[in-house]
Image (cartoon, grey):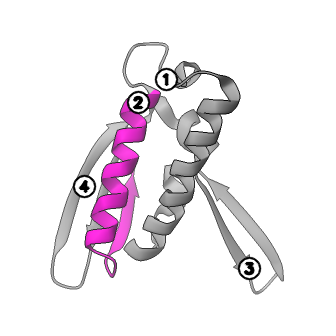
C-alpha cells in the first residue's frame, strides 16, 4: 500500500507522487496538525501524512517546515542522522526516502499555495 499525494484546484490538479506506507511511523513522529473543534470547544491534534489531507498548500507548507525542524531535532537527539529506526523492515522505504518525499510535498505546496492537498492510501 502507498500514499498517493496530489494538489487540486478549481481547474487543474498537480500530481506530487506516491510513497510506501511502510514509513508511516516516521510521518506520525514528525507531522502534527492542530485544529479547533468549535462544537466541542477543544483543540484536536492529528499526526501523520493523512493529517494534511484537505489543507491548503500554504498551510501544508508551514506544517512541513515544522516537520523538517522536528526531523533535525530527532537526528541530533538520537545521534542517528539516518533515523534508521523508521526504515521499513521489509526494505520498502526508509526514513530518508520518506523525508525526501515530504520535502517534495512541501515544495509543491509552496508552488501551489491555494490548491488543496489530497492524500489517499
Q: Tag 2, which secondary structure?
A: helix
Residue receiving disc 2: 96
Callout 4: helix, strand or loop? strand
Q: Which residue is mark 1?
A: 82
Gap in angstroms between the C-alphas marked 3 and 1: 37 Å
Closer to viewer: mark 1 or mark 4: 1
Residue beneath disc 4: 16
* Whole-number angstrom distance, CA of label 3 to CA of label 4: 29 Å
**What residue range appears in magenta?**
95-121
Q: Earlier in the sequence, mark 3 or mark 2?
A: 3
Instruction: Point out the image quarter for the N terminus.
Output: top left
Q: Residue at x 26, y 70 (%)?
A: 111
- Tell me which numbered mark, 1 or 4, is placed earlier along the sequence: 4
Q: What kind of secondary structure does the magenta stretch mostly adopt?
A: helix
Task: Tell me how far mark 3 sits from mark 2, CA to CA.
Answer: 34 Å
Q: Please state if 68 lies on the left or on the right of 110 as rendered.
A: right
* Residue denoted by label 3: 37
Q: Residues within 10 Å of mark 1 (few under 14, many from 20)?
A: few
Q: Quadrant of residue 113?
A: bottom left
Could one spot residue 40 in this view of the protein? yes
Q: Position of residue 71 (x, y in %)?
A: 56, 41
Residue at x 31% of width, y 60% of height: 107
Say few, some or many: other residues with alpha carbon within 10 Å of mark 3 (under 14 / 14 to 19 / 20 or more): few
Circle nearer the N terminus (1, 2) = 1
Residues under numbered marks 1 and 2 in contact, where contact means CB atoms less than 8 Å apart? yes
Dot in front, 3 or 2:
2
Q: Is residue 28 left or right of residue 87?
A: right
Residue at left offset 38%, top offset 53% = 120
The numbered mark, 3 or 1, whose residue comes first in the sequence reads: 3
Q: Which of the 4 image quarters holds residue 73? A: top right
Closest to the camera, between mark 2 and mark 4, is 2
Amino acid at each position: 500500500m502507498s500514499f498517493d499525494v496530489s494538489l487540486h484546484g478549481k481547474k487543474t490538479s498537480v500530481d506530487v507522487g506516491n510513497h510506501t506506507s511502510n514509513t508511516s511511523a516516521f510521518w506520525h513522529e514528525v507531522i502534527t496538525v492542530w485544529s479547533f473543534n468549535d462544537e466541542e470547544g477543544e483543540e484536536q491534534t492529528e499526526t501523520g501524512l493523512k493529517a494534511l489531507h484537505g489543507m491548503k498548500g500554504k498551510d501544508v507548507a508551514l506544517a512541513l517546515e515544522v516537520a523538517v525542524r522536528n526531523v533535525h531535532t530527532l537526528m541530533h537527539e538520537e545521534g542517528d542522522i539516518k533515523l534508521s529506526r523508521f526504515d521499513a523492515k521489509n526494505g520498502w522505504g526508509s526514513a530518508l526516502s520518506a523525508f525526501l518525499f515530504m520535502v517534495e510535498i512541501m515544495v509543491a505546496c509552496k508552488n501551489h499555495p491555494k490548491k488543496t492537498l489530497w492524500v489517499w492510501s
